[in-house]
Image (tube, helix red, strand yellow):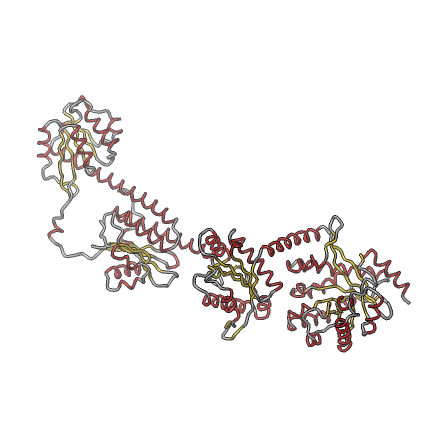
Amino acid sequence: MTGKPLQDPADIFVFADDRPVTPQDLTPPSKPWRVLVVDDDPDVHISTAFALDLTWTLERPIELLRAESAAQARQILAENADIAVVLLDVVMETADAGLLLVDYIRRELGLSATRIVLRTGQPGYAPEHETLARYDINDYRSKSELTQHKLVSALMAAVRAYEQVRTIEASRRGLQQIVLGSAELMQMSGLQRFADGVLTQVAALLGVSPHGLVCAQGPSPGGPYMVLAAAGPYAAMINQPLERLNGHPALLRLREALQHQRNHLGHSETVLYVGSERGMDMAIYLPTALTQDELTLQLLDVLCVNLSACLRNLNLVQRLQQVAYQDALLGIANRTRLIECIEAAVHSDAAPHLLILADIDDFNGINELMGHPFGDRVLQALTRRLIDSLPTAVLVARVAGNSFGLFGTADLLQAAQVQQALDAPLVIDGQPFKVRASMGSCAGADLSSSGADALKNASIALKHAKLQHRGDLVCFDSAMAQRSRNHAELLARLNAAFSDQQLFLVYQPQVNLDTRAVIGLEALLRWRREDGTMVPPDRFIPVAEQSGLIDTLGLWVFKTACLDMQRLIAAGLAPQLMAVNVSVAQFKSPTFVAQIEQTLLDTGLAAGRIELEITESVAALGLGVVEPILERLRRLGLSVAIDDFGTGYSSLAYIERLPLDRIKIDREFARQLQTGEEARIAALIAQLGSTLGLRVLAEGIEDAQVWRKLQNIGCHEGQGFHIARPMPFADLPAWLRQWNRRTP
């Protein structure tokens, strides 16, 4: 074989120590070179045998086969594919019998390695040079000139050529097998399947039985070596630590190969070392000795290089799969993996499954209060809790920042068991820490479409739980899906309406019930469609709050109200205050106060002309969150009112702690002042406001009787249809002028 090996074999191979020399070593049984003599003259056979008697070439003897006709030669050649040289008479039964036999050897039998030496006693029948080249004929000699010396020389040259051609063909076949085997190994996923393929491919290339074993380091660098594939007497070692081979010669040889990072070719075994990046290397043990010739060493060299590339590719694919299917922080399945598992279950005939999404309530508050590293530890602790509490067949996945997906058969995944795991305090930094989670589930037919749809259905149920049943489990139903679709459609239309300027403000005056003077205006958001129909605020405001659009809308409302107040001031018609509603979602924004301050600067309106109305639901945020924000607003000079008092979360102690300026009595209490409990409640609210030093304003004044009743219980400010309906800014100046003329 020509060409240099890929690297010096001495660098990668280590050979077994020399054994004592034996008689068998001195006279090894050598397979002879088989030479077929084809000639119809018996004397030629006798003289050829005499000339080649005891002749050796390339350290092997010569074995002569005899054929006295082309037909007999065909039969011998068909039954013996290992004939090295054919000494062929050109002219036998017919003038072209020899060349027809050559054609049979090359074309029909496909014996490309066998060398052909033509001999003839009739020089006039010598073939053309083109014929010699076409049939790859090694030599052509006249019988009369073929002395013993020349015959031996011609035969030795032919044998050498035969061995070279065979070596080239073996090299080509070996390289082809390596390339094809490597391509097949590249398609394998998983280290164990790869190891199985390696054992099969190596044994096939070397032409030995696939008895042996493959060990590799895993699952991470520095870990113990494990037997990943084994066959024959080693089959019981699969998935066992390599050290379980204690006392077996294979263990010593494998240790040496892995330690020195090179192959070992012994008298009774072969160990191949396959290196890889990150220290995750591999070794292959075969209880078979190999011929230590140059071709074998080169093929093994190429094989190990290719296996190393395959192993690196496998490691890369595994890392990519880890990124694609595993959460980096928690080390569990991610959203993509969860969807695939749902898909697999949906398309199988497996038992009914259940999907539960669990979302930690107020997790953003935990991050803001305790810091993100603490929040990460909460997620890690909850992950361990869920894995430890649920059967191993239940998949635990992270589907979003603080949301977990749990998926398994309905008999294994029990909602009560999940709730119990969530209710018990976690241990963070050695201290108990309680979290609460809302859950949404999806099961049965609602899991039958696709993984993405199942996750969407469970998300709809989770959102319903977060909004209306916080801390509980809500099961998905089809009506819920329809409401979600309606919600999505309304949100899309709301976004378009905001862009198309279909949203506008109206203003409802607030008056002093004793003096009838206008003391303020409440800015209210309205939506008029292109066809002129109105969308009620109680339909689109919640959608804006749930989607986050309320931040943008709220800032626009505040800025527009400030600008309109400036216009009224310029016209000499402005009351003392402009009241603007603020939602809980706005209040929770970390930039809320800064945006208010910047808007006042941009519009030039004095902060003392603005009153922000918050609802009692803000109380759910906790005093520790609400009180500092209100204090900052008060320091800017703004007034703060609590809207719809008596309908929400507030307690008397809570109200007393908050830095407020006004309480607003809900319209339902004002409308029903003539009936029992409600009248007493309105009176109690008015009395509470007086006790706390807060102004009290009633909503929903629709007739003069309610006006008087409010005055009687100590409420001296109000708004309602009896005074004025909410009106666009264009109508406001005229109304203010007219009202002021009627006010003494």
- The percent coordinates of residue 627 (x first, y second) are 68, 72
741 left or right of 39 in image: right
- The percent coordinates of residue 463 (x first, y second) are 59, 60
141 left or right of 674 in image: left
- Rendered position, 708 above or below 565: below
Snapshot quadrant of residue 237: bottom left
**Residue depicted at x 43% and y 61%:** 393
For the N terminus, the quadrant is: top left
Q: Among all residues in the image, which is located at the extreme bottom?
A: 691
Snapshot quadrant of residue 160: top left
Would residue 141 be visible to someone looking at this image?
Answer: no
Would residue 14 be visible to someone looking at this image?
Answer: yes
Q: Among all residues in the image, which is located at the extreme front?
A: 676
Residue in front for this viewpoint, 434 or 200: 434
Residue in front for this viewpoint, 481 or 153: 481
- Rendered position, 212 above or below 137: below
- Rendered position, 229 above or below 471: above
- The percent coordinates of residue 705 (x first, y second) are 84, 68
Residue in front for this viewpoint, 367 or 56: 367
100 left or right of 515 in image: left
Residue in front for this viewpoint, 733 or 203: 733
For the C terminus, the quadrant is: bottom right
Snapshot quadrant of residue 555: bottom right
